Amino acid sequence: MSAVPPPAVATGSTRATGGRRWLALGAIALAVSLVIMDATIANVALPVVIEDIHLTATEAQWMNAIYALVFAGLILTSGRLGDLYGRRRLLLLGLALFGVASLFAGSADSGTALIAARFAQGLGAAAIFPSTLSTINAMFTGRDRGIAFAVYGAMIGGMAALGPLVGGWLATDVSWRWAFWLNLPFVVVAGVGTLLLVPETRDVLARRGLDPVGVALASVGMAAVVFGLIESSTYGWVRQDDGALSPVIVTLVAGALLIGVFVLVEQARARAGRVVLVDLGLFRLRTLRYGAIAALVVALGEFGLLFALPLLLQGAMGYDALGTGWLMVALAGGTFATSGLTPRLTERLGQRTVVRAGLFLEAVAVGGLALVLPAGSAVIAGLLFVYGTGVGLATAQLTSVMLSEVPIAQSGEASGLQSTVRQLGSALGVALLGGLLIGNLGSGLADSLSGTSMPAAQQAQVVRVVKQSAGAAIPALEHQPGLAAAAAPAREAMVSAAKETTGLAAGVLALGLLATLALPAERRDEEADAPEPVTADRRG
């Protein structure tokens, strides 16, 4: 077992102070909302960023994927550092790093600099996130725990949904750079709130030591898989254009092998009684096993969609960044509309039913987008509202379901594991669905132009520019001498690629729904009246 977990705070600590724990929940949720919002706020501004600092399509994917990938690779280790040295201390360190990285992200003048800053933001996010879910799990029990998770999930979901509106407004009326600089005042507010309201806790029984081998194997393995998925549109899956072996297939195989070796190493370390990155025995719990599968594919579908949709709206449908952001408000509206209803629905129907209803709505809404694109703004907004409703129902309750059977002694480890799964799904979503969008855009446009009178060299140039810009260059084609005739085929190719991408996203969400059917039946015990467990955790 890798660690004794974060606390279920005993009587006489934070829980006994009544309203203070809800204020602490607000401070924690604000800090985490910054982390989650930053994963989405840049999406709406992405076409503007591509044009301004000349990002390539693969750099645009890496800008999003690297953040989630670093987050996923380090969150468990960061959680253990919090157990050993203090969770509030780690949270404050993460906020400081996140703020500095946001400053540099907004100042970036090249793809390399921006990706490096996003890497650093991922480091900060990995330090911020680990103790939050386990702290909530410890501070609240019974009915209050369900309400706390609902408030937490609604705030995170709402901030993630409002991020595109803020990013769109800034990109249109101010500068895309403020999409990152805007984090700075909120980092200060969250930091002050953490200092004043969140108690310092550490795990006095946690075993000393880390698992650097496990961290390296898992991180490099995941990075190799994501690299292969992102770079497939550049190098091809198996062969490059010149017939040489593609590095994509090599890195995908290497990544899979490294992840397999990681599993074997972790099992061997556990048998030897050594510290491990993650106790793989947790996957014997059906709620965590199938909940993790659902969370992975749901995050894959969600973040793949949030990457692709702004590129479509601004590249092929005539929206600017602000207009795209306003459409995304419908998603936020759906999330907030369900936040007050979710606790009552959960109490009446049970967590699993609420999760399944949410995933069903998400899959139906995204599938509807695949069918109706390019539709009018009212239709798109309506489907995004339904999608947001599903997010509001499913997100927080899925987290609660995953932790429901985990022993209190492993709650921190399990909450870190579910966060890792979600972030891995986010990175895979941007890599897989983003790669599909870009690849289909290039091939579709090449097919459309092949039947025109445009010279072959010019066709290749148009395809290269449109593909490398992920469609952001399409509006400019109409104003380029000799290239205006390519604008309409490019828009059609973008719409077709987006329909295929959203269709696949809907299928992925449906797989997440199917995974929840394997969850065990919910036990309707009197949790609210159960005595609170006392742990060895101490206020620090």
Image (tube, rainbow, N blue to C red):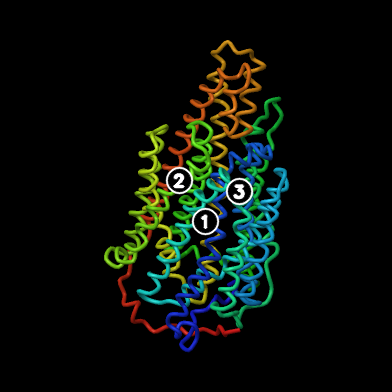
* Helix, strand or loop status at disc 1: helix
Q: Amino acid at mark 3?
A: Ala
Q: Which residue is mark 3?
A: 65
- The residue sitting at the left extreme is 348
- On the image, the x and y values in percent for residue 2 come to 60, 71
Q: Nearer the viewer, residue 145 or 103?
A: 103
Do the residues under discs 2 and 3 have CB atoms within 8 angstroms? no
Q: CA distance from mark 1 to mark 2?
A: 26 Å
- Other-residue count near label 1 (Cα within 10 Å), few / some / many at <14 / 14–19 / ≥20: many
Q: Amino acid at mark 2?
A: Trp
Q: CA distance from mark 2 to mark 3?
A: 24 Å
Q: Is label 3 or label 1 in front? A: 3
Q: Which residue is mark 1?
A: 422
| Residue at (41% x, 54% y) in the render | 391
Q: Which mark is residue 326?
A: 2
- The residue sitting at the front extreme is 173
